[in-house]
Image (cartoon, rainbow, N blue to C red):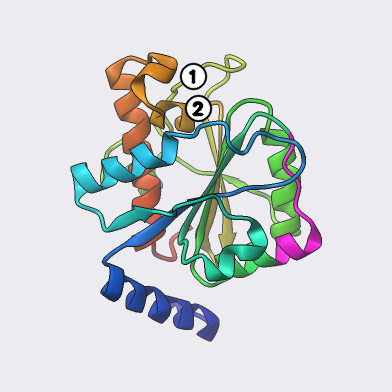
Amino acid sequence: MYFYPMQKIYFLIWALLLATTSQSQVLGLLKYDGGGDWYANPTALKNLTNFCIDELEMPVVLHESEVEPIDLDKSAISFLHATGHGRIYFEPSEVNAIRNFLERGGFLHIDDNYGMAEFAKAELLKIFPNQTPQQLPTEHPIFSGPFSFPDGLPKIHEHDNAPPSALGYFIEDELVCVLTIETDLGDGWEDPEVHNDQQEVRENALKMGANLVHWALTRNSQP
């Protein structure tokens, strides 16, 4: 039997109270240091939020502005998204803030918009010391609901002619962070005219994004 630590229980109670008063969970964009363009996909989270509401009637809302790591504890954000093409860097205090966010029940999704992946891996090693990220298998529930992706992560934009990759990071055997590489989900979430993606491609990006949000809100302790 799996038991949640008391810190997480307090967070879940707080989240329940939040949901009771606002009927929503909160998606937010991470503003980070290092020189990377954290602002790369300005319409992405708005469209993902609307998709989750319109297609699945999920109780989600978009945080009104970007958030820095040290402000996570007072932001009410439960699903934190980061993207960009360049370097991402966390100060020690920011590492602690993100780790606390995840231990309280938050979820982090970092989407490599091309050129960010190696920097992100290095920073995530600070948050998850001595942990080797796991390539999520196609059988993982994150690929099966609410939308089915039997082949795993969908390919939205081409980078280096490599297959899409979803690296998972865990706390006490629970998936709390995913780094997506060679897929560019965030580009697929953007307004249609930004990248002129085919409708099916864009829908796949939004559906996979909805799966991530769904997992963040309903996950279990399965690795």
Residue ID for mark 1: 157
Q: Is residue 108 one of those drawn in magenta?
A: no
Q: Closer to the camera, 111 or 32?
A: 32
Q: Closer to the camera, 10 or 5?
A: 10
Task: Using the numbered discs, state the Cα–Cα distance from disc 2 to disc 1 in whole angstroms.
Answer: 6 Å
Q: Position of residue 152 (x, y in %)?
A: 41, 34
Above or below 40: residue 72? below
- Residue 150: quarter of image: top left
Q: Amino acid at mark 2?
A: Thr
- Identify the residue at horizontal 50%, vertical 51% (top origin): 65
Q: Residues within 10 Å of mark 1 (few under 14, many from 20)?
A: many
- Identify the residue at horizontal 45%, vertical 61% (top origin): 78
Q: Is residue 36 visible?
A: yes
Q: Amino acid at mark 1?
A: His
Residue ID for mark 2: 183
- Identify the residue at horizontal 45%, vertical 82% (top origin): 9
Q: Is residue 150 visible?
A: no
Asked if marks 2 and 1 touch (Cβ < 8 Å), the reply is yes
